Amino acid sequence: MGFKTIISQRSFWKSVLWLGLSFLVLYNVITILFEYGELAFSTFFRERTADGKLFRFIIGQILASFLYGFILAYAQFRSKEKKK
């Protein structure tokens, strides 16, 4: 199965979405716990979005989660094809 065949599947994009969202939540929770020692969501977001960095923060989070989800989903679909 080639690259175009994999990315044209609807199930691939569902996997990208769910893996990306899972990464986004887990990464931010772990980051908050390491930096603050507690679940200080408001402090975390206030610091990350201060001084006009809201747009940068949102774009960075979306891009990171998409890339993570895409890479993992592609690896999963590719490995499934190799097992056949």
Image (tube, rainbow, N blue to C red):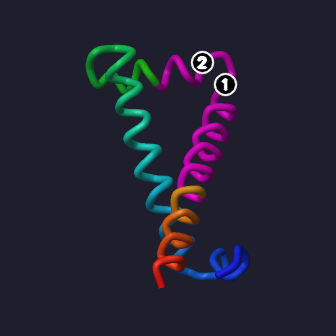
In the rendered view, would you say 15 is above or below 37?
A: below
Q: Quick one: 33 or 78, which is closer to the camera? A: 78
User: Circle 1 sits on which residue?
Assistant: 53
Magenta span has 46?
yes
Q: Quick one: 74 or 10, which is closer to the camera? A: 74
Q: Secondary structure at mark 1?
A: loop
Rendering quarter of residue 33? top left
**Label 2, residues with CA under 10 Å away: few <14, some 14-19, many ≥20:** few
Q: CA distance from mark 1 to mark 2?
A: 6 Å
User: Circle 2 sits on which residue?
Assistant: 50
Residue at 58% from the left image edge and 24% from the top image edge: 49
Stretch of the chain drawn in magenta: 45-70
The mark found on residue 84 in the picture is none
In the rendered view, would you say 32 is above or below 21?
A: above
Rendering quarter of residue 18? bottom left
Residue at 56% from the left image edge and 50% from the top image edge: 68
Along the horizontal axis of the image, is 37 left or right of 42? left
Residue at 46% from the left image edge and 78% from the top image edge: 83
Residue 15 at what x, y percent from top left?
48, 67
Rendering quarter of residue 50? top right
Residue type (three-letter) at the residue carrying disc 2: Ala
**Label 1, residues with CA under 10 Å away: few <14, some 14-19, many ≥20:** few
